[in-house]
Image (spheres, helix red, strand yellow):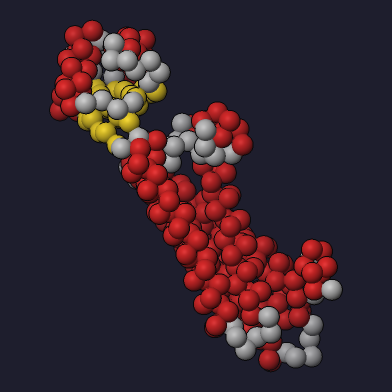
């Protein structure tokens, strides 16, 4: 993500949904070259368009991202591409223009949604676990695991953006919010069993009760998540290319959420209850 920030100006590679500008997907009826396409764009004061070839080389399909273009410039651009590069297949070409402010609004809304979800989750767990000592710790541990899953998913997306050119669009935010839901759901299942077992096994230490609770719920967590994983893998392998990125992000987030519920949220709760978190221990002292 640091490398991506230095290279692309953001932790992940952003699509036109966030950066704004024009996105032109074209299919030529004859062979085209990147240099020829770039020369045409330079004539419209677009000195550094991002040009990518789509599909197999013989498909003659290209995607060009550039700055804003007026409706008149769009028509002129199509004519120039047909004249100077190769004839365009008008039935297989599309042109989209996105205002940069829209991307900013979408990003702000997504961040606010995650923050709001974290606050609601903390409040819900605090109320639902109010009879358990230090109920707020359960909510904070769940949120810590959720943040881990968000960072892992964004980190993998950043890697895919660097090596495969994958870009974050509005659908990615939908996937991220779904990952958050998966992560919290799995964590709450384990925490709820801990809440049930604490009064039953008062003679046992806290970490023993927690371990018992994890063993009692792990089969349910794995069975539920593995069913979803198998379906997502099937869609990833045999589904269409338009949904592949969305499913891949969901799959990564789901696997991370399954891991973090057991190996992040639960250990954080245990060490917090035992007073083994250094900076919190000093604050309590």
Does 111 sit left or right of 56 as displayed? right
Q: What residue is rendered at 16% in x and 22% in y?
A: 72
Asked if residue 120 is positioned above or below residue 53 in the image, the reply reads below
Whether residue 196 appears in this view of the structure is no
* Closer-to-camera residue (38/210): 38
Does 208 sit left or right of 256 as displayed? right
| Residue 99 picture quarter | top left
| Residue 37 picture quarter | top left
* Closer-to-camera residue (240/101): 101
Q: What residue is rendered at 57% in x and 61% in y?
A: 146
Where is residue 30? Give x, y as percent.
23, 13
Does 142 sit left or right of 164 as displayed? right
Where is residue 70? Give x, y as percent.
21, 26
Asked if residue 186 is positioned above or below residue 201 in the image, the reply reads above
* Closer-to-camera residue (240/48): 48
* Closer-to-camera residue (9/165): 9
The quadrant of the image that shows the C terminus is bottom right
Q: What residue is rendered at 53% in x and 76% in y?
A: 123
Whether residue 174 appears in this view of the structure is yes
The quadrant of the image that shows the N terminus is top right
| Residue 128 picture quarter | bottom right
Where is residue 230? Give x, y as percent.
46, 56
Where is residue 14? Give x, y as percent.
44, 37
Q: What residue is rendered at 45% in x and 58% in y?
A: 112
Number of numbered markers: 0
């Amino acid at each position: 993500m640091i490398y991506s920030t230095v290279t692309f100006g953001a932790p992940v590679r952003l699509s036109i949904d966030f950066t704004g500008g024009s996105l032109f997907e074209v299919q030529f009826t004859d062979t085209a070259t990147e240099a020829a396409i770039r020369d045409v764009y330079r004539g419209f004061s677009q000195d550094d368009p991002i040009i990518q070839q789509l599909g197999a080389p013989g498909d003659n399909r290209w995607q060009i991202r550039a700055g804003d273009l007026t409706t008149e410039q769009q028509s002129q651009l199509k004519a120039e591409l047909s004249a100077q590069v190769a004839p365009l297949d008008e039935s297989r070409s599309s042109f989209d223009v996105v205002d940069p402010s829209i991307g900013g609004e979408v990003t702000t809304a997504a961040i606010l949604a995650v923050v709001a979800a974290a606050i609601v989750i903390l409040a819900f767990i605090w109320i639902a676990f109010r009879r358990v000592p230090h109920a707020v710790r359960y909510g904070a541990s769940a949120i810590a695991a959720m943040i881990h899953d968000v960072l892992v998913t964004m980190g993998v997306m950043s890697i895919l953006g660097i090596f495969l050119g994958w870009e974050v669009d509005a659908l990615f935010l939908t996937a991220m919010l779904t990952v958050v839901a998966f992560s919290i759901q799995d964590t709450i299942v384990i925490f709820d069993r801990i809440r049930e077992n604490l009064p039953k096994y008062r003679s046992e230490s806290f970490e023993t009760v927690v371990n018992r609770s994890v063993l009692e719920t792990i089969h349910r967590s794995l069975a539920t998540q593995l069913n979803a994983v198998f379906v997502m893998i099937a869609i990833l392998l045999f589904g269409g290319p338009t949904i592949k990125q969305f499913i891949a992000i969901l799959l990564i987030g789901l696997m991370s959420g399954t891991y973090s519920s057991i190996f992040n949220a639960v250990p954080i709760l245990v060490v917090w209850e035992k007073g083994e978190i250094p900076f919190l221990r000093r604050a309590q002292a």
